[in-house]
Image: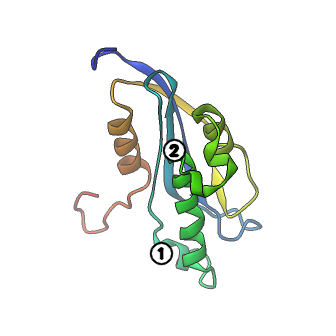
Amino acid sequence: MSESTLDPFSYAILRVVPRVERGERFNAGVVLYCRQRAFLGAKIDLDDRRLNALAPDSPGDEVRAQLDALVRVAEGDPDCGPIARMPQSERFGWLVAPASTIIQPSEVHTGLSHDPQATLDALFTELVEPIRGDGGTR
């Protein structure tokens, strides 16, 4: 498969919803799957400032641990339990399944890419990294 070949991929945004009853949320990660490239990856970053603004009593360490576990599932870390040992397509399905917990995936979006890791990095920069308030770049 040549590097210039565009392959379809699917991705979802991982959102933190600290108080589900209020529905307030912020983006904390992206998970991307490209079957043709045998790629499943997730990238996360918990913005403690945002978490404290929405739910000052929310345990940031526990939320971060949950997000880290999702990355480990995407990576197929066998120490992360039986879900992490499933095939990539099944792990992706599990990662993007609707949830009513503090971590909720968005709907699944699709696109084309010749480099899924670079696409994951670009989506993370665009959708998760906070925009600096001083007029600078992300």
Position of residue 46 in the picture relative to residue 96 (left or right): left
Observer-nearest residue: 80 or 41? 80
Q: Is mark 2 on a helix, strand or loop?
A: strand
Residue 98 appears in the picture as rendered? yes
Q: Where is residue 67 in the image (x, y as percent from the top left)?
A: 55, 61
Say which mark, if any, is on residue 31.
Answer: 2
Between disc 2 and disc 1, whose residue precedes? 2
The residue that appears at 63% across and 40% down in the rendered structure is 91
Instruction: Look at the image and name its color scheme.
Output: rainbow
Residue 107 appears in the picture as rendered? no
The outermost residue toward the left is 136
Q: Position of residue 29 (x, y in %)?
A: 49, 54
Q: Where is residue 87 in the image (x, y as percent from the top left)?
A: 61, 34
Report the label total: 2
Observer-nearest residue: 28 or 116? 116
The residue that appears at 34% across and 24% down in the rendered structure is 114
Observer-nearest residue: 113 or 134? 113
Tag 1 residue: 48
The residue that appears at 77% across and 67% down in the rendered structure is 21
Looking at the image, residue 117 lies above or below residue 66: above
| Tag 2 near tag 1, CB within 8 Å | no
Looking at the image, residue 85 lies above or below residue 69: above
In the rendered image, the quadrant that contains the C terminus is bottom left
